[in-house]
Image: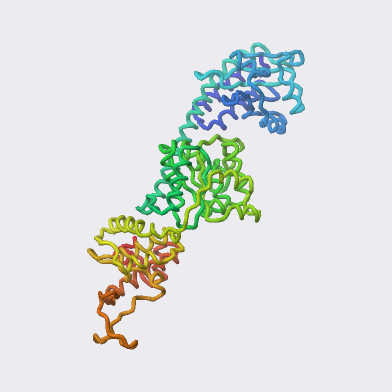
Amino acid sequence: MDPRGDASRLRLLYDLGCAFAARTDLDELVTLVVEKCCDTFGAEGASVLRRDPETDELYFPYVVADDPAVAEKLAGMRFPADQGIAGAVVQSGRSILVEDAAADARINREADRLTGITTRSLLAAPLTTHQGTIGVLQLVNRRGGTFTADDLGFLESLAGSVAVAIENAELVRQLKASEGRLRTQVGVLRRDLARHDRFTEIVGTSPAMAEVFRLMESAAPTPITVLIQGESGTGKELVARGIHKASERAEGPFIAVNCAALAENLLESELFGHRRGSFTGAMNDRVGLFEAAKSGTIFLDEVGEMPAVMQAKLLRVLQEGEVVPVGDNRPRRVDARVISATNRDLAAQVRLGACREDLYYRIAGFPIGLPPLRERREDILPIAARMLVATAERYKKRITGFDQSAVDLLVRYDWPGNVRELQNEIERGTALARNDESIGAAHLSAKLRGGDAEPRSTVAPGGDADASDGRAPRRAGAGTVPLPSFRDARTAFEADFITKTLAASGGNITRAAQMMGLSRVALQKKMKEYGLR
């Protein structure tokens, strides 16, 4: 009989019953079980060993010992699930009492060598659920004596309740993880809806784009990591989404993250998640984007901007297929395809030491280069036409197309901002054009017209020709651009001024209004009037 008496054991049952009813956090629950068992049985050490079904190994996720160093050493130990006393318990499904460990050949001597502790006596009971034996509850070295058959019977009955509590806690953890993934996915989708243009399809008939489509078709059905390279605004995310939609993971989530937009500490939490209390403000556990992208694709945009420390952690994910949340020490398996994108020359970055060579070869398994818009001018008008239809619908306007003066400017311009810059021009033109009017040169920005603030008139005030060059006057409509009305000129200026001020304020309407000397309400009315929302 335990020298602490039946009262001690009844107290243990009461405390654990209360804990099973009140606690759903797996780590807190099992740690409490191990601590209470160690104290009640008067053991020098107690542990819960779990069986890893993927590797068929036993490991020590929960250990309590007189010496904290022992727990740390055992935390990294793994051994086959058919070895040691714990292995015998897993194989047989029955509890085991070892009164004289020195005489028992089944004892795992490696644990003693690792910790420097000599096992004298041992109790081990299976943790059995409807899934089978999921682990072992084990006690080592009773202080002042050895464990007895009575101890074994009590531990065996206790282990059944512990196993059910662990199973329930794991179900709760899985539900919370699923909820966390769904919340993260919904949040990402909402951000996507808020920031993406209506233009969501890749348009292109040029030879350069035909090659891009060919590469996308080849990459889509395989799990290979893809690196999309191209200038800013060329549509790298559209290509990544296209590959995802054509892959076997199309039913899974597509989650995009801009690696350049987050500080290093925030990026790690965003990608890998964090545990509650791991840093100031971490009030709850958070599922990272890699876990949220389960069975889908995670798109790492601007991966070339990732700090060196994060490069090493990303490499581990790609090599091992697992992440370690901030504040945790146990890895979690992830199942997400990785597609990366960059506007940098990563090979040159490797030579400069700014990018890890091993990471480069991991993410660049299948490179796809996107040509800039100036190298596929035959695609400019089809893209612009598609954008115009979508933008006019969004602005609730009837725009008849582009006149020849606008077509000439659109095709001639080099588009350093690529498709994104073209979209901005279509937005501007649609805002300035009237219903049932086509977009002309007057509706496009000065940079497309060669730097002029507005197109110059060919007719002087009063109707006289501007004949300073000695030529006969030309009528508007005969190959020239007519002078816009005062109202159109003012509208063009105000819309352009508001657009630029909003850009300078980072999209903050209150700050932009202050910069322009307007009230927030007045600015919002102007934005609504010009379709700039």
Which image quadrant is residue 126 in? top right
Q: Nearer the viewer, residue 452 or 209?
A: 209
Q: Where residue 212 appears, x then y in whole percent?
A: 45, 49
Is residue 429 found left or right of 314 in the rendered image?
left
Q: Is residue 191 above or below residue 440?
A: above
Q: Where residue 518 appears, x then y in whole percent?
A: 36, 70
Is residue 524 found left or right of 305 in the rendered image?
left
Which image quadrant is residue 6 in? top right
Q: Where residue 146 appears, x then y in whole percent?
A: 72, 16
Q: Nearer the viewer, residue 176 or 22?
A: 176
Q: Quadrant of the C terminus?
A: bottom left
Q: Residue at x 46, y 46 (%)?
A: 240
The image shows a total of numbered marks equal to 0
Q: Where residue 120 appears, x then y in whole percent?
A: 74, 18
Q: Residue at x 31, y 85 (%)?
A: 471
Q: Nearer the viewer, residue 168 or 398?
A: 398
Q: Is residue 310 above or below residue 92?
A: below
Which image quadrant is residue 395 in? bottom left
Q: Is residue 30 above or below residue 350?
A: above
Q: Is residue 284 visible?
A: no
